[in-house]
Image (tube, rainbow, N blue to C red):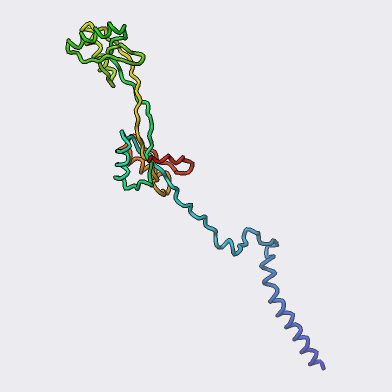
């Protein structure tokens, strides 16, 4: 009987020891330093696969090139650029240009102006009689882009006793521009590079995103 009691005691001790070895490691991991793991150290499945932001599609850019002296010249340039007629438009625009420097004899009564004009013509001096506008009955002696050139001519005519003065001659010009879609570009840097290329051949170069840009009216 003592032998059987001894065997039961040994078996109970063995079961207690085996159970303690299974539970202890999990407790020691969670409470080895008396604190629970911080939330920041826990990773979920979604955090292991970061979400990537999709790359936005390229923007559509539009261009305006000019200036052309006629609508036909703008159409010829469109053909040279490989544009079909329905893919571009031609814009007509009145532009204010820098005024010219005008050497002239001031207006005077009509009969006196005609008499002086005939005398100047007999002397072989290049001139014409102004017949309309606020300077009607003045005698024009030349139009110049350079102020220095105009002053030189005025002084020469005054030495010939023509009483010439210097005035400004305003002027406008009808010009034409070619408008079309460039196509999709990655960013404004590409648009700037393309704009620099066009500036070698055109006075007017505008390349912008088509969004918010009014579509020009197509010429017939």
Q: Is residue 51 visible?
A: yes
Asked which quadrant contains residue 40, the reply is bottom right
Asked which quadrant contains residue 125, the reply is top left
Residue 55 in the image: above or below residue 33: above
User: 171 or 121: nearer the eye?
Assistant: 121
* Quadrant where the C terminus is found in the figure: top left
* Quadrant where the N terminus is found in the figure: bottom right
Residue 16 in the image: above or below residue 73: below
Give the side of residue 220 with respect to residue 201, left or right: right
Task: Name the residue at 68% across, 65% down.
Answer: 32
Asked which quadrant contains residue 164, the reply is top left
Task: Indicate the position of residue 163 as horizontal and vertical percent values.
Answer: 26, 7
Task: Name the residue at 80% across, 89% down.
Answer: 5
Residue 86 in the image: above or below residue 31: above
User: 112 or 156: nearer the eye?
Assistant: 112
Task: Indicate the position of residue 156 as horizontal and vertical percent values.
Answer: 22, 11
User: 198 or 163: nearer the eye?
Assistant: 163
């Amino acid at each position: 009987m003592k032998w059987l009691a001894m065997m039961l005691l040994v078996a109970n001790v063995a079961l207690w020891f085996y159970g303690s070895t299974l539970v202890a490691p999990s407790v020691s991991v969670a409470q080895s330093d008396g604190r629970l793991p911080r939330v920041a150290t826990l990773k979920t499945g979604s955090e292991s696969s970061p979400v990537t932001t999709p790359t936005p599609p390229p923007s559509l850019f539009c261009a305006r090139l000019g200036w052309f002296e006629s609508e036909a010249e703008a159409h010829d340039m469109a053909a040279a650029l490989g544009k079909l007629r329905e893919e571009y438009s031609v814009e007509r625009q009145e532009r204010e240009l820098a005024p010219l420097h005008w050497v002239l004899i001031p207006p005077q009564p009509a009969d006196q102006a005609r008499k002086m004009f005939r005398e100047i013509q007999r002397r072989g001096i290049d001139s014409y009689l102004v017949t309309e506008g606020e300077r009607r009955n003045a005698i024009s002696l030349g139009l110049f882009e350079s102020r220095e050139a105009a002053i030189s001519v005025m002084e020469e005519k005054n030495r010939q006793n023509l009483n010439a003065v210097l005035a400004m001659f305003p002027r406008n010009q009808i010009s034409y521009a070619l408008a079309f879609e460039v196509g999709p570009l990655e960013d404004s840097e590409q648009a700037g590079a393309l704009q620099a290329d066009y500036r070698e051949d055109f006075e007017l170069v505008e390349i912008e995103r088509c969004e918010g840009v009014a579509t020009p009216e197509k010429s017939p």
